[in-house]
Image: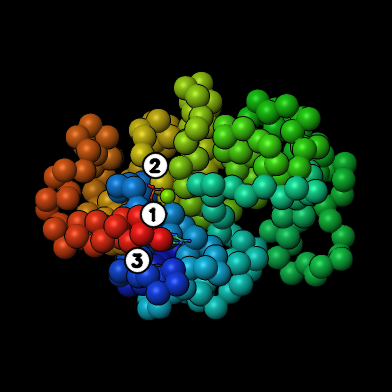
């Protein structure tokens, strides 16, 4: 059976501020989707809502995976069931070492029925796998001894997200600007790594403002978000057009969504 993640008429608010206003999106396992759109259009909000961030309230609509109600699941259940989000701005967890964090997360995802306190993946087995994956990503093994994202450079944080992706092997991965802050060499490596780990092997939703990540991960579908709605869907050529010419055409073609986008930005300024 092909896994499918379905989002239907999704409305999401932060506090009393409506952000997503009816998002429809269906991702099949093995497909790569690019999600583009101007700043503040709601891309990260979609990722956080799919993952179940408590600050993002779903006021209408549905999210299902293989027909199961994702909205009824707690965030950790969503992760165990195979959904992964690489954060645009990953949080630091001082006091928790990368290796311990990854060992717990990996065990929980591989053994979704594991109860707290039950055995983890054996240390030797886990270490060997982690070492191999880190070498592949050209990460220093010293990294695993550091606290999660604590004092990581922008680029290190993004690499740590890709390492999680490699270890967790989710069914669906949302990568929120996993290219931001990476230097030219690092972004190429990230693009290649994501292709190797996930392209064709999971459902990928790649949120990006650049074309580099898509170079090795050509999207079958490109979606454009504006004012909390997906206003247009195309193929790789749509991503190319937006990279080359920006959002002028889109803003003019969808004046209502553009007005909503401007309204959100204006509100942001007065917070
Ligand atoms: N926690 C929050 N508190 C207040 N406003 C928020 C919060 N999260 C999102 N918003 C608002 O929702 C709108 C959409 O934000 P979001 O981060 O989803 O945009 P984005 O498309 O990811 O933008 P970017 O390309 O800049 O990352 C913005 O106006 C933003 O200020
Ligand atoms: Mg964002």
* Ligand 1 is within 8 Å of the C-beta of the residue at disc 1: yes
Q: Label 2, secondary structure: give it.
A: loop
Where 158 falls versus 233 (above or below)?
above
- Residue 61 found in image quarter: bottom left
> In this rendering, would 198 be left or right of 149?
left
What residue appears at the point 30 percent right and 48 percent down from the top-left corner? 37
Quick one: label 2, few (<14), some, or many (20+) residues within 10 Å? many
Instruction: Tell which of 36 and 146 is nearer to you.
Output: 146
Residue 216 picture quarter: top left
Pointers 1 and 3 in contact (C-beta within 8 Å): no
Q: Camera-side residue: 221 or 104? A: 104
> Furthest residue to the front?
270
| Mark carried by residue 238 | none
Which residue position is annotated with label 3? Answer: 20
Pointer 3 residue Cβ closer than 8 Å to ligand 1: no
The residue drawn where x is 68% and y is 37% is 151
Say which label, 2 or 1, has the lower sequence index. Answer: 1
Q: Quadrant of ligand 1?
A: bottom left
The residue lying toward the viewer, choosing from 138 and 217, is 138
Label 1 SS: helix
Q: Position of residue 123 (x, y in %)?
A: 87, 45
Q: How far across and how far down the image is residue 118, in percent?
A: 86, 65
In the visual, does 222 lie left or right of 202? left
Query: Is tag 1's residue or tag 3's residue first in the polypeptide sequence?
Result: 3
Q: Quadrant of the C terminus?
A: bottom left
Can residue 10 be seen here?
no
How far, Cα to Cα, is label 3 from label 2? 18 Å
**On the image, numbered disc 1 is attached to which residue?**
43
Q: Is residue 120 visible?
A: yes
Question: In percent of the image, x 30 and y 70: which residue is there?
Answer: 22
Residue that label 2 marks: 208
Q: Secondary structure at mark 3?
A: strand
């Amino acid at each position: 059976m092909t896994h499918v993640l379905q989002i239907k008429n999704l409305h999401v608010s932060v506090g009393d501020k409506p952000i997503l206003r009816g998002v429809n999106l269906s991702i099949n396992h093995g497909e790569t989707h690019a999600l583009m759109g101007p700043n503040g259009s709601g891309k990260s909000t979609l990722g956080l809502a799919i993952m179940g961030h408590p600050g993002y309230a779903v006021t209408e609509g549905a999210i299902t995976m293989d027909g199961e109600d994702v909205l009824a699941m707690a965030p950790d259940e969503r992760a165990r069931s195979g959904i992964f989000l690489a954060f645009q701005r990953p949080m630091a967890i001082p006091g928790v070492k990368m290796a311990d964090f990854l060992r717990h997360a990996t065990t929980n995802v591989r053994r979704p029925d594991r109860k707290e306190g039950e055995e983890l993946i054996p240390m030797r087995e886990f270490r060997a796998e982690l070492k191999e994956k880190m070498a592949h990503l050209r990460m220093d093994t010293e990294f695993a001894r550091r606290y999660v994202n604590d004092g990581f450079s922008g680029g290190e944080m993004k690499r740590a997200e890709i390492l999680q992706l490699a270890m967790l092997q989710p069914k669906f991965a949302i990568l929120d600007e996993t290219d931001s802050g990476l230097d030219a060499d690092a972004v190429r490596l990230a693009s290649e790594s994501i292709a190797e780990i996930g392209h064709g092997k999971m459902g990928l939703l790649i949120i990006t403002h650049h074309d580099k990540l898509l170079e090795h991960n050509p999207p079958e579908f490109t979606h454009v978000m504006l004012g909390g709605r997906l206003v247009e869907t195309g193929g790789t050529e749509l991503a190319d057009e937006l990279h080359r010419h920006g959002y002028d055409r889109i803003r003019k073609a969808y004046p209502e969504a553009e007005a909503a986008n401007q309204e959100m930005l204006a509100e942001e300024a007065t917070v």
